[in-house]
Image (cartoon, grey):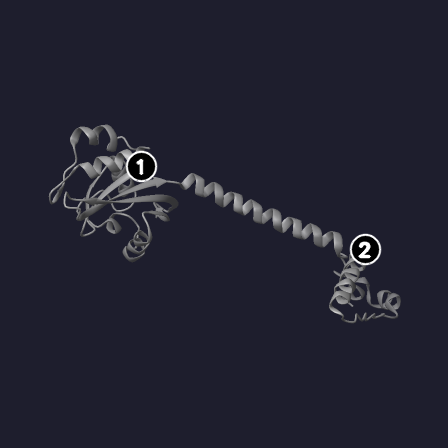
């Protein structure tokens, strides 16, 4: 809701070749917006910004109107222009003060009375907390998946030989036989028997026998 009001104020404030903001509306709406607002001219330079925008710029290069947006914020010009060309909504990451931050950006064209685009309004909404929560959830999910995989391995494999335990071996054999029958293929089972393991264990030790 605040984003729509902010855009309307900027759009109505356009006069001729200058982006002239209505003081009262700016004070009531734009100045108090928690989101960072940047007004950009046709040449890509920042014409104006609200206090939240100035605070955001201060976290990187400092609030200096007249510079391109990619000079105020850690953004690559080509990537930003390419993203904006694909739509008026985009999500991006910026490193500010050594901290990774996430932002949702809304863009609106500013047109003069003749309908010619004179600039754009970019509204940066901080989504860092949500992004961090998603990262933590993804990490927890990955850790749980890895733990479940390891638990499955411990249940189905012998910890010493790392081969399938009897129940898991029989289950897998049945599955392979059923798959072979469906495909009209034969199944062959190779068995290997190691002799004299007891003697090897007694003469060379359990560690050597375990390796064998």
Q: Count neighbours of disc 2 (C-alpha within 10 A) and say few if under 14, some if 14 to 19, many if 20 or more.
A: few
Which label is found at residue 104? none
Q: Give the labeled residue for mark 1.
A: 35
Residue 102: x, y in percent? 39, 44
Residue 34 at least partly seen: no
- The answer to whether residue 46 is above or below residue 187 is above
Q: Quadrant of the C terminus?
A: bottom right
Q: Is 208 or 126 nearer to us in this picture?
A: 126
Residue occupying image coordinates x 36% and y 44%: 103
Q: Is residue 168 left or right of residue 64?
A: right
Q: Is residue 130 left or right of residue 86?
A: right
Q: Give the labeled residue for mark 2.
A: 167
Residue 167 occupies quadrant: bottom right
Residue 114: x, y in percent? 14, 46
Residue 106: x, y in percent? 31, 43
Residue 70: x, y in percent? 26, 51
Residue 20 at least partly seen: yes
């Amino acid at each position: 809701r605040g984003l729509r009001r902010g855009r309307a104020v900027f759009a109505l404030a356009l006069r001729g070749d200058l982006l002239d903001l209505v003081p009262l509306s700016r004070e009531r709406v734009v100045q108090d917006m928690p989101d960072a607002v940047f007004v950009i001219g046709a040449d890509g330079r920042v014409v104006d910004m609200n206090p939240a925008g100035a605070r955001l710029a201060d976290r990187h290069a400092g609030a200096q109107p007249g510079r391109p947006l990619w000079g105020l914020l850690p953004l690559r010009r080509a990537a930003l222009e390419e993203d904006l060309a694909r739509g008026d909504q985009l999500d991006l990451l910026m490193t500010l003060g050594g901290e990774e931050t996430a932002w949702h950006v809304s863009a609106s064209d500013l047109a003069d009375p003749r309908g010619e685009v004179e600039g754009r309004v970019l509204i940066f909404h901080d989504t860092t907390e949500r992004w961090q929560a998603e990262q933590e959830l993804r990490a927890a999910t990955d850790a749980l998946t890895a733990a479940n995989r390891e638990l499955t391995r411990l249940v189905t494999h012998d910890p010493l030989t790392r081969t399938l335990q009897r129940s898991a071996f029989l289950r897998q054999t049945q599955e392979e036989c059923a798959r072979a029958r469906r495909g009209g293929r034969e199944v062959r089972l190779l068995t290997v028997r190691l002799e004299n393991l007891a003697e090897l264990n007694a003469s060379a030790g359990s560690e050597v026998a375990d390796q064998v």
